[in-house]
Image (tube, rainbow, N blue to C red):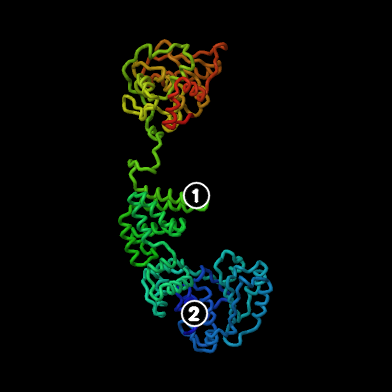
Amino acid sequence: MGEYIVSARKYRPTRFDSVVGQSALTTTLKNAVSSGKLAHAYLFCGPRGVGKTTCARIFAKTINCLSPKANGEACDECESCKAFNEQRSLNIFELDAASNNSVDDIRSLTEQTRVPPQVGKYKVFIIDEVHMLSAGAFNAFLKTLEEPPAHVVFILATTEKHKVLPTIISRCQIYDFERMSVKDTVEHLKHVAQQEGISYEEQALAVIAEKADGGMRDALSIFDQAASFCQGNITYDKVVEDLNVLDAEVYFNMVDLCRQNKVSEVMVALNKILNSGFDASQMVNGLAKHIRNVMMAKDEATLPLLEVSQQQQERLKEQAAQCDTRFLYQSLRILNRCDINYRTSSNKRLLVELTLIEVAQVTQPDDNPVAGRRPRRLKSLFKNLLSQPRPMQRAPQVAPAEARQPATAPRAAVATASISVTPTASSTATATMAQLTSKDGQIIKGLRGTSGQPLGFSWNNVRQMSKQRKMQIIPGTLDKDDPNAKVQEEHCEFSQQELELQWMLMCNRMPEKLSGIATRMKNMNPRIGQFPAIEVDVDNQIMLEQLQTIQGSIINTLKIYLHNCDITLTMRVVERNEQVKILSRREQFEEMEQSNPAIAKLRELFDLELA
């Protein structure tokens, strides 16, 4: 039994034509050799195991070949080629910059450049992992790299080009090596398996190629491992077991369960995966990659982007036909968010479980009340409660005692009456409070008025609505002497609640230049005097004069929205001894809570905010 040599060394290419997956670069190098147009320095960049050092060695052998072929390949028969193949050539020097990165090492290398080659045309210096050189070594190397002797060629190889000094890069011809595709890797593994007399399943080789992540050296190392485990018969099941990777069937099954909203079965499948020793992040990333492949399989144009075997590609196409595109997009977004938050999460399993629950509910109908769904916030039910301001539809007449309030009504009563209700019938206000509590004190859900609409809304909603549908009020445009003022001849009754509501809406609709007046008007309490006369108390004379400039606009606005053309407005300055403390909205609400505890329950139930 001869000495065992690993496949990565045994099947290392010795000619440009045998290099896998780098046809563009090898063609360029062969043309340079055949034309004799050689640079003095080359920089080979790319991931690990893609052929950088191999191509450097082949290139060094070819340019020293005494009788190169017409296609740019070495003859493998001359003395120089034989010396290279037998690893006794004195024209090729390799330096590992990872362990020889000092200034002295570079100076020793530059000393050797002065000696011309004994056999062949060039001395080739291959510096591997050149980015590991120290700053001093780079600087000592600059001059020699820029103007080397005519018989010297430098080939620098690195996996991290961004760490190489720009002054070094500018002196080299740069060749960027690509990652190996799964297809090219599988084809090369087939060739190695045939040479070694090993039987295989193509799907098993595809798993090895995916595990190698674009590196041919890694793929050959994994191939040797799998061949030892499988004892000459490489099968898919044994490769999955040996490499400890999740079977693709797991991902196909997980997607089907999520698409069918089977949350409980998804949790069972996740628990089985974790108990098998797999990391949760590995499962999330694998599932995201699988869903990405399913999405690529939905379109014939994106099929070439799938780096899988032909058999698995057909399965992906079948599952893609069953999955909605929206489900795939949303699932990828959710899984990507989980991957971002995974490292910082203190409870990683819970994060993954919540992520899979969310993925399993992407296609779930909104009206299907399944445990785990995010509940619809009640506040969103009121977003269309108020349309753009328009004249209210009148309700039947109310009793005069209910429609009128004395001018000396206590402030607490006014605050209580300012509960937000829709401007429907005035009798609705009484129905609202009557329905707030049931006999056992519980809040009755889904309060509705006579028109079938919800009864409550917050001042915050009113303010947002008024910003979206602001009607500009310009002083004087609605004056009673203005011929453009359209006030219908109506004589409808209105209540104190409706007056306060329309007063607040009017303040919210006032233009930006009257924002100061509007803010002070919101703190006023208009009241019904001798119906339909409206009285407003003003704190000082200056404020009174400001209001008098827009008094006509205020009167005409109230006439339109309260449907009463007989409205009059009286404003007076409050005497010093009549002034009382102006309550803030929070203080008003606290008084309302004290007088009626059901209001606090109503706020909690509807998730209302106090603006």
Extreme-front residue of the structure: 275
- Image height check: is 340 above or below 493? below
Dot 1 alpha-carbon crowd within 10 angstroms: few under 14, some 14 to 19, many 20 or more: few
Q: What residue type is labelled 2?
A: Ile
Residue 340 at what x, y percent from top left? 49, 52
Which numbered disc, 1 or 2, marks the residue closer to the eye?
Answer: 1
Residue 526 at what x, y percent from top left? 46, 17
* Res 426 seen here: yes
Q: Tell me: 296 left or right of 53.
A: left
Q: What element carries label 1?
A: loop
Dot 2 alpha-carbon crowd within 10 angstroms: few under 14, some 14 to 19, many 20 or more: few
Q: What element carries label 2?
A: loop
Towards the viewer: 22 or 282 = 282
Q: What residue type is labelled 1?
A: Asn
Q: Residue 571 carries which label?
A: none
Please give the count of numbered marks on the rendered protein.
2
- Image height check: is 493 above or below 586? above
Lower sequence index among marks 1 and 2 = 2
Residue that badge 1 annotates: 347
Q: Tell me: 35 left or right of 495.
A: right
Residue 300 at what x, y percent from top left? 33, 61
Q: Which residue is drawn at 45% across and 53% down?
A: 336
Residue 134 at what x, y percent from top left? 65, 67
Q: Residue 5 carries which label?
A: 2
- Image height check: is 82 above or below 307? below
Q: Tell me: 89 left or right of 357.
A: right
